[in-house]
Amino acid sequence: AQKITQTQPGMFVQEKEAVTLDCTYDTSDPSYGLFWYKQPSSGEMIFLIYQGSYDQQNATEGRYSLNFQKARKSANLVISASQLGDSAMYFCAMRNGGATNKLIFGTGTLLAVQP
Amino acid sequence: DAGVIQSPRHEVTEMGQEVTLRCKPISGHDYLFWYRQTMMRGLELLIYFNNNVPIDDSGMPEDRFSAKMPNASFSTLKIQPSEPRDSAVYFCASSPGSGTGTNEKLFFGSGTQLSVL
């Protein structure tokens, strides 16, 4: 069965500093995709970054990078140079390949960026 | 592209009434998903469709919930009768495909905030 675990309910970070949001996953499928979404207080779900299970390099998208450690089944999100606008809820998610294509989410981490 | 379009944005109804939520996916996307978000349970997948066919409805809470996708450009989620515990934000999302790569990425609508009094 698929499972996503985010153990940090909330985090604080100072503006301009880097922050790491933790995510671990469990699946028996060798093919899967890992995602991070941002949900600001306005409520929309914003895609940030994607990592495929067969990708050799860690994904990066601007200030976002995904620290993918396959053996540990972890997919941590690193936000560099935090900005006040980064304050939001962050969700880690996984989608299996094969017959099961549903995207399941972790419980989320609420990030507060302090000036 | 207009993105995934959901209506209404807000719905307030009384217990026992029928509620219908609507979704228009992005043109050309083969997958459509319905999620429910609450503080207590987070983001739950209710049901998803592939090429208009329901694939997995194991997340649908009970028989009061039903979802249809009569064509590639329209889906509905119906609750009948509604109860106060159904109050939540309901998201619709679509994706181009599956397999690997960012084709798996889900594009979300703005959500419907449902309040059942």
Image: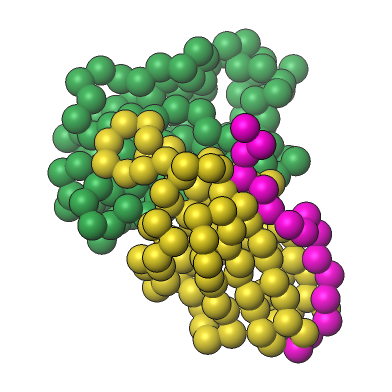
B12 left or right, relative to A108: right
Image coordinates for residue A108, horizontal then vertical, percent: 53, 46
Question: What's the residue at 71%, 21% (across, down)?
Answer: A84
Q: Can you say whether B96 is above or below A101 in the image?
A: above
Question: What's the residue at 50%, 13% (across, down)?
Answer: A62
In front here: B62 or B21?
A: B21
In front here: B113 or A111?
A: B113
Image coordinates for residue B89, horizontal then vertical, percent: 68, 59
Image coordinates for residue A83, horizontal then vertical, percent: 66, 17
User: Could you tell me if residue B36 is visible in this image?
Assistant: no
Q: Which residues are magenta?
A: B1-16
Chain letter for green?
A: A
User: Could you tell me if residue B117 is visible in this image?
Assistant: yes
- A52 falls in the magenta region: no
Q: Can you say whether B50 is above or below A68 in the image?
A: below
Image coordinates for residue A74, horizontal then vertical, percent: 30, 36
- B14 falls in the magenta region: yes
Q: Quadrant of residue A23?
A: top left
Colour in which chain B is shown? Answer: yellow
B4 left or right, relative to A76: right
